[in-house]
Every structure is written in C-alpha cells, then in structure tokens.
Image (cartoon, rainbow, N blue to C red):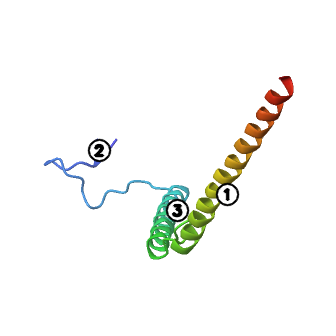
Amino acid sequence: MFDDYKKKDGILDENVILGLSLKTLIAIGITVAAAVSSYMTLQADIQVAMDEPKPPVSRTEYELQTKMMDKAILETKQDISEIKKSIEKMEDRLFNQRR
C-alpha cells in the first residue's frame, strides 16, 4: 500500500498523505472519547469505593443481634425443659391410668 511512498531507506516520507477521511477521523475521535470517559468513570467509582467502605452491619448492631440471639436460645432451652417436664407428667399419668 505504501510502497509508492517509501524512500530508498525504507522509511515513509513526511510528505505522505495517508488518505484518512473525515468519517474515519470522527470514528477515531469518538472511540478515544468513549475510552477516556469509561476510564475516568471507573477511576471515580474506585475512589468512591475506597473513601466510603460501608460495612453491611455496624458493630453495635452486631452486638445487639448477638444478644437477642443468645436470649432467644436461652428462652428456647427453657421452653424445651418445660415441654419435657410436661411430657414426663403426661407419660406418668398415662402409665398410672393403665395399671
């Protein structure tokens, strides 16, 4: 393609016209602008993520949830103990009725 424009030493001459159309220049400009815009947006998003790391649960909220769960477990243990006692009473009554 550029064989006609080459100098004797194999380098293109500075007077060579490559024949870029206006359409091609606009396409190149839009592509470069889109790439730069995407890069800048990505950098801004990264900066925001670095500046404001928000934990999903705060320390206080975690402690309160842990206390509530511990309390619920203890209440469930008590309920199970009461249910076991009730079952034992029912079994004793049932066993005594059969005699």
Q: Position of residue 61 (x, y in %)?
A: 58, 71
- The CA span between labels 1 and 2 is 93 Å
In terms of sequence position, does the residue under pointer 2 or pointer 3 come before the other?
2
Circle 3 residue: 34
SS of the residue under disc 3:
helix
Circle 1 residue: 75
In terms of sequence position, does the residue under pointer 1 or pointer 2 come before the other?
2
In terms of sequence position, does the residue under pointer 3 or pointer 1 come before the other?
3
Q: Position of residue 60 (x, y in %)?
A: 55, 74
Residue located 83% across and 23% down the image:
99
Residue located 23% across and 48% down the image:
6
Q: Nearer the viewer, residue 66 or 87?
A: 87
Circle 2 residue: 4
SS of the residue under disc 2:
helix
Of the numbered discs in the image, which one, if any, rests on residue 7? none
SS of the residue under disc 1:
helix
Neighbourhood count class around disc 3 (C-alpha, 10 Å): few under 14, some 14–19, many 20 upward:
few
Neighbourhood count class around disc 2 (C-alpha, 10 Å): few under 14, some 14–19, many 20 upward:
few
Indicate the amino acid at tag 3. Ala
